[in-house]
Amino acid sequence: MRAPPSFQRRMSLDFPTVAVLGFLLCVGIALGFSLLLVVLRGQPVLRLWTLSLWALTLGVTLLALRPYLPQVPAILAGNAAMAACAVLLLRGMALHLGQPLPAWRPLLLVAAFMTGIFLFLVPWPNLVVRLHVFSVFAALIDGWIAWLLLRHAPPQQRTSCRLAAAVFLAEGLLYVVRLFLPVAAGAGEDIMRTGTPMFVTYLAGVMLELARCFALVLLLVERMLVELRRAARIDGLTGLLNRSAVLADGQLQLEQARRHGTPLALLLLDVDHFKQVNDRWGHLAGDYVLQHFTAVLQRCAIGRVHLLSRYGGEEFLLLLPGSSGNEATALADAIRHGLQQRPALLDTGPVAVTASIGLVLDDGRTDLSGLIALADTALYRAKAEGRNRLVAVPTPA
């Protein structure tokens, strides 16, 4: 059954309808990101992207209302808001990827863009040239963002970066295509009368704006997932691997060492008299001693293949793939010497920190948990024999 002509007219898409849809979409997306910002406080990337979306909304509003406003100020302000949207989006992307972005680079591009808009609005009014200036500017920004995403994507965030890059490349390609499309002869200075080919690109632009919104959300979500996975593996106080992480990674290292026929040593370290530190100076002092102990371990292990973990409480596990017994013994001595040379500096003064250490070598048969149990036996022997010493099981060769 054919719809009445009046219904067809109401449902037809034209420039004003697409403009209204674009405006509503911009407002909806900006509001959505603002709500995200309320929940995810302290996210500078999200803050920049939210500001960019509100700048886009302002630009679309000013350009849509130009028949009811002074034309020249409205067009200049609208394009300036669009430029601000692009710069904020670009800076947010650089920050998301951890890349420096000198302010002068995008600002120089914005200055060239606004100069072109002004010249072909005031001295030599020409809508076609202004459309081309805007298209070149937008294509350059989209290409710049896509390049950042493809060139500097963190290994664990490549999926979201590649998908987002595809969206920005598609949007940039749309603006390049627009450079070669004809503008209706009777358009004059009215962007709403530029003709069917331009209308199709505006409609595609609305769809790509929605896709860009989802791409930005995907970038944020994947980064948060990576940070959550990392937090699940990292000890919050020392920044070292936690127990579950080192057990998983250590077993893989052990299996790899055995496949290649290389040695592997394991050190289990315990901070001597740590309970006395907590009882005498408090838990904050105890936390500082653990951080100090961690710093000494990391300094001594520099240059060696290793896995370092806070195994639990004041116990630390140091796995040394490729290290012989003599090398592991030398490292343990270096750790003890390093602690002796660098006491922990509390507010009340320096505090000597020592460690008891158990050493075990891979025997080719025992799994990682078994090796840790052997090292634990050696560690308690070291503590029983007076602390601040190394005991190895078996004796290093």
Image: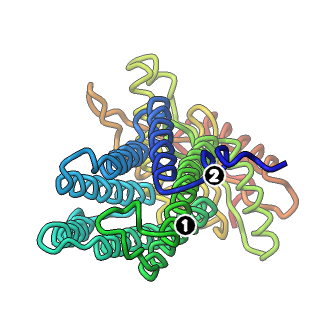
What x and y, as percent, mark residue 338? Answer: 40, 52
How many C-alpha atoms fall within 10 Å of the one at disc 2: few (<14), some, or many (≥20)?
many
Which residue corresponds to the image point at 60% horizontal and 42% vertical from the top-left? 228
Q: Indicate the quadrant where residue 157 lies.
A: bottom right
Of residue 308 and residue 188, the one placed in the foreground of this image is: 188
Residue closest to the far front: 5
Going by the image, does 216 lie left or right of 232? left
Residue 194 against residue 228 in the figure, above or below: below
Which residue corresponds to the image point at 38% horizontal and 46% vertical from the top-left? 57
What x and y, as percent, mark residue 266? Answer: 67, 55
Which residue corresponds to the image point at 56% horizontal and 63% vertical from the top-left? 204
The mark tally for this picture is 2
Q: Which residue is mark 1?
A: 200
What x and y, as percent, mark residue 285? Answer: 39, 26
Q: Which residue is mark 2?
A: 267
Circle number at residue 380: none
Q: CA distance from mark 1 to mark 2?
A: 67 Å
Secondary structure under tag 2 reads: strand
Going by the image, does 102 lie left or right of 30? left
Whether residue 19 is visible? yes
Of residue 247 and residue 76, the one placed in the foreground of this image is: 76
